[in-house]
Image (cartoon, grey):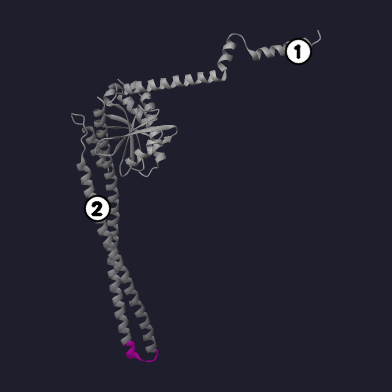
């Protein structure tokens, strides 16, 4: 991933040509996509091999168990033969037991080798899976970068064909200020209208002229109270 | 969520008292220009890829910034990018941008929230960085 990021940064620094147009490197993602497919193929193969090996191990386990069981049951036969004084028969059975044990040892040896190979293969699968995740992550970065460059190139072309050029930040700011001033004016007008509708504006004018109905009634009450008092 | 269904959905939609004026941008990829009411000056461009819905607003060009102020501008942009809701600051070619990306499975409400926030953020950022302009 580090290599991909560094490559992208280098490309970005020099990616605008003299006309100011984005130079999109579509080669980058094509190579990554091929690597991704190879990695996926490798993983699939390794998994198939692994499944076959594991099946083989399971089969060996069954065969080993069979040989074990046979040896065990023959041992009981041999004991019975000895108990019956059939020395010759017991020897024959013992030879069979040796055969079973030899086969068991061979099968066990084969299983050890298979298990060794299984471990190696599991390792390969794990590495391939890690590699695959890495390629997917890299591909996503490269593809997103290509897409962003294509998109902005498309936007720029569009802006250039609709207007003479992209408006500058200063022009945009000016338009924002004009709109914000219009909004403030509207809000002020709304507040004024509200006052007129409720008569609040008239009350304010009367107050300004020193005419305050509320204050007058308070004064009236005070005067009456004072008048009631015995002097 | 694709651009076609967004054109249809945003046309009559209202989100937090805001409406959307959607225009397709001609070209090979599906790109929309979306003006959010009350922030019409900073149109949001939206494109949908297989891994994300990308929304971005152009702030200013590198050539519009006082050369001596560039390091300070970059420092300020990096610092302000983290706390800014739903948006991050970046640079594509010579455009400084504010952008946000959403999962392609986002709902229409989530996309509208992103558009409104992004357009408002763009205005706040322009006014914040005005002093860095030539």
- The quadrant where residue A28 appears: top left
Drawn side of residue A61 relative to residue A191, left or right: left
Give coordinates of residue A132: x percent, y percent: 28, 50
Is residue A227 placed above or below A158 in the rendered structure? above
Residue at position x 33%, y 38% in the image: B54
Residue A225 - label: 1
Taking the view exactly as shown, the residue that stands out farthest to the bottom is A85
Drawn side of residue B8 relative to residue A16, left or right: right
Examine the structure image and report whether residue B101 is included in the region drawn in magenta: no
Drawn side of residue B83 relative to residue A10, left or right: right
Q: Which of labels 2 and 1 is toward the front?
A: 1
- State which tag comes first along the sequence, 2 or 1: 2
| Same-chain check, marks 2 and 1 | yes
| Part of the protein shown in magenta | A83-91
> The disc numbered 1 marks a residue on which chain?
A
Taking the view exactly as shown, the residue that stands out farthest to the front is A197
Q: CA distance from mark 2 to mark 1?
A: 102 Å
Taking the view exactly as shown, the residue that stands out farthest to the right is A230
Q: Could you classify mark 2 by the number of other residues whose Cα lies within 10 Å: few (under 14), some (14-19), or many (20 or more)?
A: many
- The quadrant where residue B106 appears: top left
């Amino acid at each position: 991933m580090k290599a991909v990021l560094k490559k992208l940064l280098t490309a970005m620094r020099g990616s605008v040509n003299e006309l100011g147009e984005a130079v999109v490197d579509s080669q980058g993602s094509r190579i990554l996509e091929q690597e991704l497919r190879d990695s996926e193929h490798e993983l699939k193969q390794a998994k198939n091999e692994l499944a076959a090996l594991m099946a083989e191990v399971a089969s060996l386990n069954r065969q080993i168990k069979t040989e074990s069981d046979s040896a065990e049951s023959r041992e009981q036969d041999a004991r019975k033969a000895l108990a019956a004084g059939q020395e010759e028969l017991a020897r024959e059975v013992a030879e069979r037991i040796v055969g079973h044990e030899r086969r068991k040892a061979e099968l066990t040896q084969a299983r050890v080798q298979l298990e060794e190979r299984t471990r190696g293969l599991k390792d390969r699968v794990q590495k391939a899976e890690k590699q695959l995740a890495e390629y997917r992550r890299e591909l996503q970065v490269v593809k997103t970068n290509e897409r962003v460059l294509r998109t902005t190139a498309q936007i720029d072309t569009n802006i250039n064909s609709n207007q003479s050029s992209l408006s500058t930040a200063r022009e945009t700011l000016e338009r924002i200020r004009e709109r914000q001033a219009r909004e403030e004016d509207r809000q002020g007008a709304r507040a004024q209208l509200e006052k007129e509708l409720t008569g609040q504006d008239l009350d304010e004018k009367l107050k300004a002229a020193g005419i305050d109905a509320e204050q007058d009634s308070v004064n009236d009450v005070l005067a009456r109270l004072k008048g009631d008092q015995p002097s | 969520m694709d651009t076609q269904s967004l054109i249809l959905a945003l046309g009559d939609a209202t989100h937090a008292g805001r409406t959307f004026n959607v225009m397709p941008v001609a070209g090979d990829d599906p790109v929309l220009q979306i003006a959010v009411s009350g922030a019409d000056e900073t149109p949001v461009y939206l494109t949908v890829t297989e891994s994300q819905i990308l929304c971005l607003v152009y702030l200013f060009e590198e050539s519009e910034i006082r050369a001596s102020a560039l390091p300070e501008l970059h420092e300020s942009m990096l610092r302000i990018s983290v706390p800014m809701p739903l948006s991050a600051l970046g640079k594509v070619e010579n455009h400084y941008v504010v952008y946000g990306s959403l999962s392609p499975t986002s709902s229409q409400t989530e996309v509208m929230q992103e558009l409104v926030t992004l357009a408002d953020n763009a205005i706040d950022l322009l006014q914040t960085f005005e002093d860095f302009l030539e």
